[in-house]
Amino acid sequence: MARTAGSHSDITGPRVRAAALALFSQHGYAAVSMRRIAQDVGVQAGALYNYTPDKQSLLFELMRGHMDDLLQARSQEPALETPSDRLEAFTRFHIRFHLERPEAVFISYMELRNLTPENFAAIEDLRRHYEGELEAILRDGRDAGAFHVADTKITTLAIIAMLTGVNTWYRSGGRLSLPEVEAIYWDMVRKAVT
């Protein structure tokens, strides 16, 4: 099938991903057709297959891209010495990173069930890598006597769920600034582990 007039792969490919991201987060993966994505991009439905093999691949690419960006950004953060400093840095990083990407965060948590088993396993592996960093901080703090946690895995999952929850209510320009929110959440995380 010929490419639609005015369509360029370096422009249309990112537009396909952006449209899918917005539509999946607004309506849910199951409710969005390839035809609807094509309509939002302004190409014929068949033209989408020049950019992705199918809708499942598109969902997986969005989720993997989010996790790759998360792990890459985290790897750029400075290395800190004490478990407490590391935990505070992780807390603040998680909030900042995720608040900038509400649609990607929503899809990453709500659409896992729509991945094929193979794609689910790949995303879970990336998530475990990120969660493992926080669990290592908690384990190091516990071993050093700085933290008191009964189970580092459960505490890891609870902290991540709490921090990700900021996305559901925080709005820029609201009652609290982002640094104030980070400080309040850091205080809650600190109290939860000491």
Image (spheres, rainbow, N blue to C red):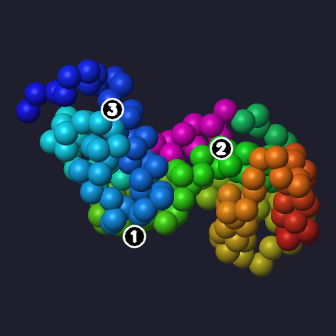
Residue found at x 54% / y 40%:
69
Residue found at x 29% / y 44%:
39
Local packing at callout 2 (Cα closer than 10 Å; few below 14, some 14-19, many 20+) is few
> How far, Cα to Cα, is label 2 from label 1?
24 Å
Residue found at x 52% / y 63%:
109
> How far, Cα to Cα, is label 3 from label 2?
22 Å
> How far, Cα to Cα, is label 3 from label 1?
25 Å
Q: Earlier in the sequence, mark 3 or mark 1?
A: 3
Q: Which mark is residue 192?
A: none
Q: Amino acid at mark 1?
A: Arg
Q: Earlier in the sequence, mark 3 or mark 2?
A: 3
Question: Picture coordinates of residue 192 (x, y %)?
Answer: 85, 71
Residue 127 in the figure: left or right of residue 114? right
Q: Residue furthest bottom?
A: 150
Q: Quadrant of the N terminus?
A: top left
**Vertical placement of 148 versus 32: above or below?**
below
**Vertical placement of 167 versus 16: above or below?**
below
Q: Earlier in the sequence, mark 2 or mark 1?
A: 2
Read off the residue under disc 1.
113
